[in-house]
Image (cartoon, rainbow, N blue to C red):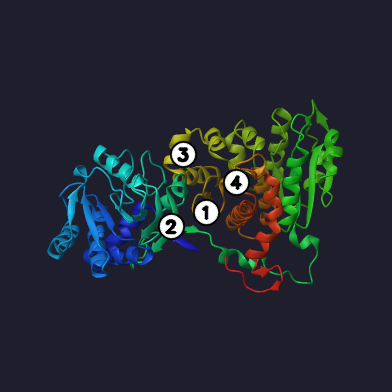
Amino acid sequence: MTEVLSVENMRASDAATIAGGTSGRELMMRAARGIFDAAAWKAPAAIICGTGNNAGDGYALALLLEEAGIFCELFLITDRFTEDGGFFHAKCLERGIPEHLMRDTPSLKGYGTVADCLLGTGFHGEPREEIKDAIEKINASGAYVVAADICSGLSGDSGMGTCYVRADLTVSVGGYKPGHFLNLAKDASKVTVNADIGIRPVMEPYGLVEASDLRPYFSDRPHFSHKGTYGYLALLGGSDRYSGAIRLAYLANAAMRSGAGVVKVAVPASIRSDVAVHILESTLFPMPEENGGMRFDEGLMGELISNVKTAAIGPGIGRGEEIRKILHFLLTGFSGRLIIDADGLSELAQLDPEVLRSASCEVILTPHLKEFSRLSGKAVPEITEDPIGTAREYASEHGCILLLKGPATVITDGQRVLLTDRGCPGMATAGSGDVLTGILAATCARMEDPLMAAAAGAYLNGLAGELAESSIGPVSMVAGDTVAAIPEAVRRLGGISQSGPGGVVL
């Protein structure tokens, strides 16, 4: 698990490190060394400096480039400096490193590398005009762009920004921040790495899930096991208007390919023939219907969930009072884990919140931004400005696990926070959410820790999507391609190659 520090945690941890005897200048030089070592420098180099400690990293970086014989020039927004930054700026002047004011520089074209040392992770909001101008010149330079700590213009906590640097490489300093993964982060930087400069968190960090964390759950199975060992699942979805036989196949087949023992698919009786041909390995459980949608029947619902560890409701199931009755029954009468997605989330928003708070089962909600907006009552911009905080608050208040979907996924039970950053643009297609729900049902049925189970499902889904996109491309990819890639994703997570046992490094 890789540590991810909020901006507040990073500030407190940096201060504690300095109070413990490591000087700010030493940390600044370590940061510069980390940036220098991580990048493939092409001369000449331009280092664009703001006014804070991020600029100080730039001045220290210039000294390292000069020592290495790589010609560089400094471009300053203004001649104001922090105490430590001013120390390294004076050293640059002593060494004769050329410097210019950014406002007097019409263009950065012609430089092999441009280092962005304008704004640090503490920035949020709208950049000042002179900073905007510098960002635009960096983006128009055509150079190899290296961002120090974070792409200037992005928030370190949310990864949001209105005007931001687009970097080839970002070198996070001290520890990753949420803004290196959330929202616009993947569009802002092609590659992000971290430079460890000896700062240890003083508050509990968030966790970025890695393949090594999941390997025990996807490695070889014992011979002395059977289908019940790996979980009975119930998946509820479909209606005559949104029969979505293929969608339900994505759901069921994703669950089977992700290691479920038995999958029961509950659908309105009238669409069972359409669905049956697509889910040969799963068991169909026809339900009574009303106006083309599933109708609540307490006896049949009890039979459906009697022996299952995990149930999932939502994809294509439609809306209305009968669906609310089914959802209410599951929340109050099911003792396993319940995943609610799609239409299920819309109906949950219509129920008394107390039903969720007092649920008899462990509940995992999987909203995208608009669905979470309906659930939480918060506007989408408010959520994107603080995705971890809003998700954590909702999960804590309602006693559930929230899996907030996005370029990086936030998973929280209101206390712990996990992030997964696997996934790709090709997954922005109909049915991808159904695939995730099926995968989650499988991981939640056989993993003890529900938060880790949810994170494992999100990671496996994203990895399978990446594998599919690598062979098909983002434009032509469909959700079924992700399902088809699940076996290879499972092999990789388990450290098993196609040719037999052996480690596979992700």
Which of the marked residues, 4 or 1, is nearer the chain's N terminus?
1
Q: Amino acid at mark 2?
A: Thr
Q: Amino acid at mark 3?
A: Ile
Q: Nearer the viewer, mark 4 or mark 3?
A: 4
Q: Amino acid at mark 1?
A: Asp
**Could you tell me how far apart the alpha carbons at marks 4 and 3 are, in whole angstroms?**
27 Å
**Could you tell me how far apart the alpha carbons at marks 2 and 3 are, in whole angstroms?**
24 Å
Badge 1 element: loop
Which of the marked residues, 2 or 3, is nearer the chain's N terminus?
2
Q: Could you tell me residue 156's position as x and y percent?
A: 37, 49
Q: Nearer the viewer, mark 3 or mark 1?
A: 1
- Mark 3 Cα shell of 10 Å, populated few (<14), some (14-19), many (≥20): some
Q: With 202 as the anchor, is 100 left or right in this view?
A: left
**Residue 361 in view:** no
Where residue 474 is drawn, which disc sits there? Answer: 4
Residue reaching furthest bottom?
502
* Marks 4,2: beta carbons within 8 A: no
Where residue 421 is drawn, which disc sits there? Answer: 1
- Mark 1 Cα shell of 10 Å, populated few (<14), some (14-19), many (≥20): many
Question: Which residue has dot 3 on it?
Answer: 383
Q: Could you tell me residue 128's position as x and y percent?
A: 26, 39
Question: Which residue has dot 2 on it?
Answer: 192
Badge 4 element: loop
**Residue 486 in view:** yes
Q: Residue at x 61, y 69 (%)?
A: 504
Q: Is residue 390 above or below residue 47?
A: above
- Mark 4 Cα shell of 10 Å, populated few (<14), some (14-19), many (≥20): some
Q: Nearer the viewer, mark 4 or mark 1?
A: 4
